[in-house]
Image (cartoon, rainbow, N blue to C red):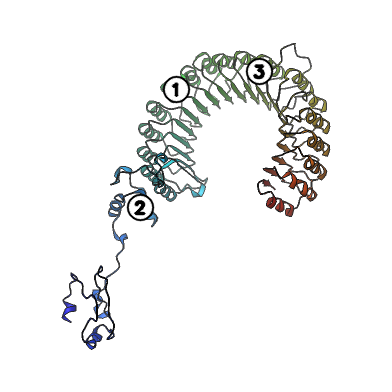
Amino acid sequence: MSQIYSFAGENEFYRRGAIYPNPKDASLLLSLGSYVDVYFPPSKRSRVVAPTVFSAFEEKPVSIDVLPDECLFEIFRRLPGPQERSSCAFVSKHWLTLVSSIRQKELDVVPSNKSEDGDDDCEGCLSRSLDGKKATDVRLAAIAVGTAGRGGLGKLSIRGSSSVSKVSDIGLRSIGRSCPSLGSLSLWNLSTVTDNGLLEIAEGCTQLEKLDLNRCSTITDKGLVAIARSCPNLTELTLEACSRIGDEGLQAIARSCSKLKSVSIKNCPLVRDQGIASLLSNTTFSLAKLKLQMLNVTDVSLAVVGHYGLSVTDLVLSGLSHVSEKGFWVMGNGVGLQKLNSLTITACQGVTDAGLESVGKGCPNMKKAIISRSPLLSDNGLVSFAKASVSLESVQLEECHRVTQFGFFGSLLNCGEKLKAFSLVNCLGIRDLTTGLPASPHCSALRSLSIRNCPGFGDANLAALGKLCLQLEEIDLCGLKGITESGFLHLIQNSLVKMNFSGCSSLTDKVISAITARNGWTLEVLNIDGCSNISDASMVSIAANCQILSDLDLSKCSISDSGIQALASSEKLKLQILSMAGCSMVTDKSLPAIVRLGSTLLGLNLQQCRSISNSTVDFLVERLYKCDILS
């Protein structure tokens, strides 16, 4: 008994054998049998197990969670590597939050750039995206900790939901403190992220090169200033619908980010001329792409673009309601846009004949021009622009209703020998020619022609194009209901590669037969969606003549099982994409023919084919396992 009460825990109580020489004495206290031995491994201290009389000697369980956060923080930051910290983060959300709050400079060990596979070149190679309900602070913390030991996070995209956003500054803090290799960050629709979150990114992610802020209403100039000061390698900046970012933030970016190559600003009401001027004047030799959309800027900004845009190759100007004709005229005369390659102007009231002509003269190397929703542009301005733009290769006009057929043909004749593509979209001023064109050289370089939804475009215009453009390879005549059979036949003399007659209700089997007979060796894409006069006869012509056709759209045509069987019977036809959407006369009887066509098909559209049963579709899905089927 004295041995029990005098035991202090400093030495092992007993190693082997019966505890008491006399078993009767032992049974009084421990109720142990006379032949029972209690063995304690040498590496462990022996315990005394007694009845409730000795409950004072029992050890109570102790948890590490009783330690304050400060102690846990010190433990976590002293772990030898990111894998160990990641393992700890999996224990609970509380530990995850603590681990993700450790800054890289607070680690007690030098962080290694090697991934788990030992690849030294994997730093910043991982990309993560969170959308909708999946975008939460907890997931961001998990990404921050989980990617630290696997090469590092290089690209992160967060798109919040239309309801309440679950991403806050806490989530961005985790990224900023654990992902120093982050190079690209995109934040969309995050009303709960403020400048504090962006400050964490700026402090921890100094290698940031691309920043995209979209509908981040609580981020102000303060956040953008922090990015500018800490991220000098920024090359791309996109701001959209950020109502509290203005000139101060842009000025900071301009002063500190000398490597800036691309800037896109849309619907930011606080951005004015001062911010644009500072941006252009400080990035004269680096900025290559510039988009200004729906901003409260005036002619001053366009004058600055024309003077300082020495490196700009791609320029987009859209919805600039306060810019007048003078702004475009000064921009063209600024002679700074010598390297401009592509110009897009949309819904700018200042685009007039004089303004567009000036732009054409001031951009001698421009190859692509898209002019959209310019109600003041007329035939004279379009022709003058074509004459001035000596390097122009592609022109697209959309919703320019004052442009008529004379402006269209005048620009074709004056664009020079480099023009390869011309597109008219929804230009209601276009009418059919009533007089012949003057004698002029052919448009020998034109390869692509697109006339879409211009209801006044008729047979006379197509006849003129057939004589003027002898080298066409791609023709898009979508929604032209005024063209008859004779008009289409004017274009069959060319070696056509792609043809789109979608919505041309007057297209007939005779036209398809003539086109396939003449262009069967070159035709690769044919779209006759919505041409209700097309029947099985056209399918027979296609099967007999087309050698390399890969994409065929027969949606809402008057074809039946016989037409599909004709296509399947061709040994030459190797279709990859076939659309029969809305072909109500195609039934289950076409199943064997579709299966034969399916040997090469990669895409099949059977939507709204009401005569094809679900069982047939299920069979095709199982049989044509390499083909994507829409039904």
Give the mark nearer the N terminus: 1 vs 3: 1
- Judged left or right of residue 249, residue 46 is left
Q: Nearer the viewer, residue 141 or 110?
A: 110
Is disc 3 placed on a helix, strand or loop? Answer: loop
Read off the residue under disc 3.
378
Give the structural element (helix, strand or loop) at label 2: helix
Q: Nearer the viewer, residue 218 or 551?
A: 551
Spot occupied by residue 282 in the image (x, y as percentages of width and height): 41, 22
Q: CA distance from mark 1 to mark 3?
A: 31 Å
The mark found on residue 280 in the picture is: 1
Q: Secondary structure at mark 1?
A: helix
Upstream in sequence: badge 3 or badge 2: 2
Residue 84: mark = 2
Q: From what the image shows, is residue 2 above or below residue 589?
A: below
In the image, residue 8 above or below residue 129 = below
Three-letter code, disc 3: Ser
Q: CA distance from mark 3 to mark 2?
A: 70 Å
Task: Find the distance from the CA under tag 1 to the CA under tag 2.
Answer: 48 Å
